[in-house]
Image: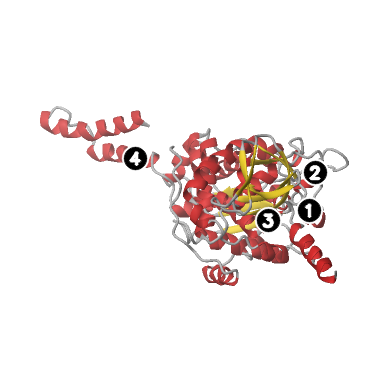
Amino acid sequence: MRAQLFFASLLVSLPVAAFDLGGFGNIDLEKAAKVVQKVQKANADINEPQEIDLGGGIASNLLGAAPLWDNPPVQRYVNKVGRWLALQTERPDLPWQFGVLDDDDVNAFAAPGGYVFITKGLLARMNNEAELAGVLAHEISHVLRKHHLQALKKGARSELMSDLANDAIKSQGGDPRLSKLVSAGTEIYARGLDKQDEYEADRMGVVIAARAGYDPYGLPAVLQTLQSINPNDSNLALMFKTHPALGDRLSLLDGLMSESLADSEGQPDLAERFAIQLKVK
Amino acid sequence: MMNKLSLSLLLLVVASSAWAGDAAYTIRATELKVKPYGDAEVLRSLPARTKVEVLKRQSSWTQVKAGTTSGWVKMLSLQLEASATGRRSDNGLSALFNVATTGRGGSTVTTGVRGLSEEQLKNAQPDPQALRAAKKYAASRAEAKRFADEGKLQSHDVDYLSGGR
């Protein structure tokens, strides 16, 4: 990265020197400028429409792995909670899309551009709407901070991310290189994000829930519940593998929340609405 | 007599939240308080690793029974006991969802192509039709606001917490 920038500034300064000395007339100014542009673009981020297209591909893969739960009322309910949370953030108007996956695994997923999924297995272990809000807000935070895009930029497909940013890959139109990028994006779920990204999503998630008017202790309550599940339960295997230890996440939140979120204590957890929305039909 | 009966029934209903009856222990010395407030009267001090029974949670506080004394402790000074079956963390909805609370080890077959295991995610095939179906359920700004109003949820300005990164 630094080497590239240095190279770029060198290219900028060279032609100027060439004029001064008059001896490097064969350097093509226009060509040099193009190289500079390309180097700059390689370090640029993909734009929002590209982010949304890439995220849609990853979300489509995720739905290929686990189907959407066929329960329209619950799907609509989760979308309303999620969208209300997203409205409290710096990216309120992404095409936010939430969903419950029909799977017993205990996990939740975010994809770039505003896609958020939780499993039925995780939903089944929640006690109120504030807990649901806490988990969705954690996932929303991954989207806000573009954690998956950063993981892709650092990964084996980083050159494809540059090509996408550079418009060398069109995000729509079935370029096979885009499929490779989508596959790499899906594999991040199997590998997990950076530990620090998870802690950041926890810190942001409790704040977003508090902004939305919920009891901010929903997320730590869910984490505490998960602590009580037998760690050998295979439904938790991937979540445990891809996230920092629950005890560490809880103790970090504990220190921060007792200082800064005291004013939000006593906000509703909407346990009744949650129970009604998820009741047996 | 009748009043007492209905009162105890009411208490039973109130106490039957999902965590009621969970076993937990304190992960540090903590104060057992009369009410769930920082400045509430202290009933007694619980040393680390005191076993308690969970009655219910309210924001950052959990109501517990320590021996014969009931009171409130900070929720995050507790750790719930891991249960062999996972049943304790079950809110009752899992029966409705047919979630296998004992995990996938026993009779539950998981050899299907689809699923959220590491291997299955690596080999996932796209399902654009399912994505289109999911989009039907998206909520608009206006719907989300109406939903918040119905729940009496009010938005507040709260700054993000810095984590010293």
Q: Mark 4 points at which residue?
A: A40
Residues under labels 2 and 3: Cα distance? 19 Å
The kind of residue tagged 2 is Gly
Residues under labels 4 and 2: Cα distance? 46 Å
Image position of A28 (left or right of A104)? left
Image position of A27 (left or right of A105)? left
Q: Is mark 1 on a helix, strand or loop?
A: helix
Disc 2: host chain: B
Q: Name the residue under label 3.
A: A100
The kind of residue tagged 1 is Ser
CB atoms of marks 2 and 1 within 8 Å: no
Say which mark, if any, is on residue B94: 1
Disc 1: host chain: B
> Is disc 4 in the same subunit as disc 2?
no
The kind of residue tagged 4 is Gln
Residues under labels 2 and 1: Cα distance? 21 Å
Regarding residue A191, the answer to whether it shows in the image is no
Earlier residue among tags 2 and 1: 1
> Is disc 3 in the same subunit as disc 1?
no
Pick the front one: A14 or B41: B41
Earlier residue among tags 3 and 4: 4
| Residue farthest toward the right in the current orientation of the protein | B107
Q: Residue at x 60, y 68 (%)?
A: B151
Q: Which residue is drawn at 14% across and 27% down?
A: A23
Q: What element carries label 4?
A: helix
